[in-house]
Image (cartoon, helix red, strand yellow):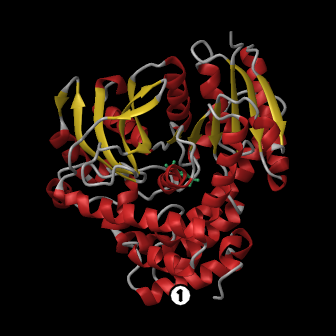
Amino acid sequence: MKKGIKIVTIGGGSSYTPELIEGFIKRYDELPIRELWLVDVDEGKEKLEIVGSLAKRMVEKAGLPIEIHLTLDRRKALEGADFVTTQFRVGLLDARMKDERIPLKYGVIGQETNGPGGLFKGLRTIPVILDIVKDIEELCPNAWLVNFTNPAGMVTEAILRYSNHKKVVGLCNVPIGIKMRIADGLGVDASRVQVNFAGLNHMVFGLDVFLDGESILDKVIEDMANPDSSMSMSNIKAIAWDPDFLRGLGAIPCPYHRYYYKTSDMLEEELRAAETEGTRAEVVRSLEKDLFKLYKDPNLTIKPPQLEKRGGAYYSDAACSLISSIYNDKRDIQTVNTLNNGAIASIADDSAVEVNCVITKDGPKPISVGDLPVTVRGLVQQIKSFERVAAEAAVTGDYNTALVAMTINPLVPSDTIAKKILNEMLEAHKEYLPQFFNSVEV
Ligand code: G6P
């Protein structure tokens, strides 16, 4: 008989790790973890030690027999794992800052997961995750990989398309965040609310909303249309939606849709922020500094509330519920990134989508939504093309493919600007993009 679960978290030195620990502690009865391995790279060693010590104190305070291991040796950690979670940032926050600042010079949105920034985060991340997946196939082939590393949709797409490991789920807190905010707005417990989500990561729509089984979509749209109740998340400025636009759209957009539907307002806001408090990476750098100062305190034994200033609210709930539902074959409904398999008619069966799924011991089973409404279908398809071409560029290191990915992204206005941004960003991120520099002259 199995003695308990072994979980490995790659990017374990992340400031988000206490979220995860809190979630595991809360669910220990249903998810008896025996070992949690926090893995990081050399540059993350100090953070790993600080956050790892806090994790140990949290577990000890809870009186639970979870062993916490800290290591820089990924292969050693992966041996015999049941679940692997990934939450790393190739190039750390410096790379994110470049992703956010360089496009702004050309009048284009600079964002962690959208537009040129999302493309470059994908180009840096995909080869690394595919390497991790190779280790998983060799050292723990039965393990489920739960990926939070952004851009989570593109990363899930790349793993499904370019590896043989099919036990992968991409996870994001956007759907659960929307659901919680709707429940808060209605003043009801979230368990009474169901949202039919469909689309892609950071491109997901609520196609219908139910309270106790009855559709309340129109009411929620009216609530969102009220400029005072504009829903967002801490990392995205809650610029109010146009009420008539929302009514016409007939679906609930996610906070990231502001970059597409309110591009000029968001650009103006980003340019303002870049000149004043800094881009989000710079704000996060300072938040992280404060967080790690708190984490170092030997008397701290809980997740500090200051972590809520990051964009990852409910992230531990999403992650730990998913792992528990797979482990316990719960067959509840959660929104995750998985193989489409016909769930969304207008997206290829073999692509990754973000959609409501029944979570079983054999993984997520997507619930069919038929086709997307014509109001949102085109943009979703366009982003899917972008993700697929971007994933191909990440794997091949082909310049022309990367240029096509950049140009077909709806936030980039022309091939001329795409090329300028591409060239500058390739140079800026050279160190993390070896696949482009063995064969390409820029
Ligand atoms: C949300 C998104 C995540 C993203 C995060 C950024 O949670 O769903 O994908 O990583 O925001 O938050 P940050 O505090 O790093 O800006």
Q: From the viewer's side, name the closer residue of 294 and 330.
A: 330
Q: Does 315 appear above or below 243?
A: above
371 to the left or right of 405: left
Q: Position of residue 111 (x, y in %)?
A: 51, 66
Image quarter hosting the C terminus: bottom right
80 to the left or right of 252: right
Q: Does 194 appear above or below 39?
A: above
Q: Position of residue 292 (x, y in %)?
A: 76, 45
Q: Position of residue 123 (x, y in %)?
A: 59, 66
Residue shown at the point (52%, 76%) measured from the top left: 402
Residue shown at the point (14%, 57%) measured from the top left: 248
Q: Does 108 appear above or below 133?
A: below
Q: Which residue is mark 1?
A: 420
Q: From the viewer's side, name the closer residue of 101 and 130.
A: 130
Is residue 279 in sight in this rendering? no
Q: Quadrant of residue 33?
A: top right
Residue shown at the point (50%, 67%) measured from the top left: 390
**Kind of residue indicated by mark 1:** Lys
Say which element carries label 1. helix
Residue shown at the point (75%, 13%) measured from the top left: 63
Q: Position of residue 377 (x, y in %)?
A: 24, 58
Which residue is at the far top?
1
Is residue 156 in sight in this rendering? yes
Q: From the viewer's side, name the closer residue of 50 and 367.
A: 367
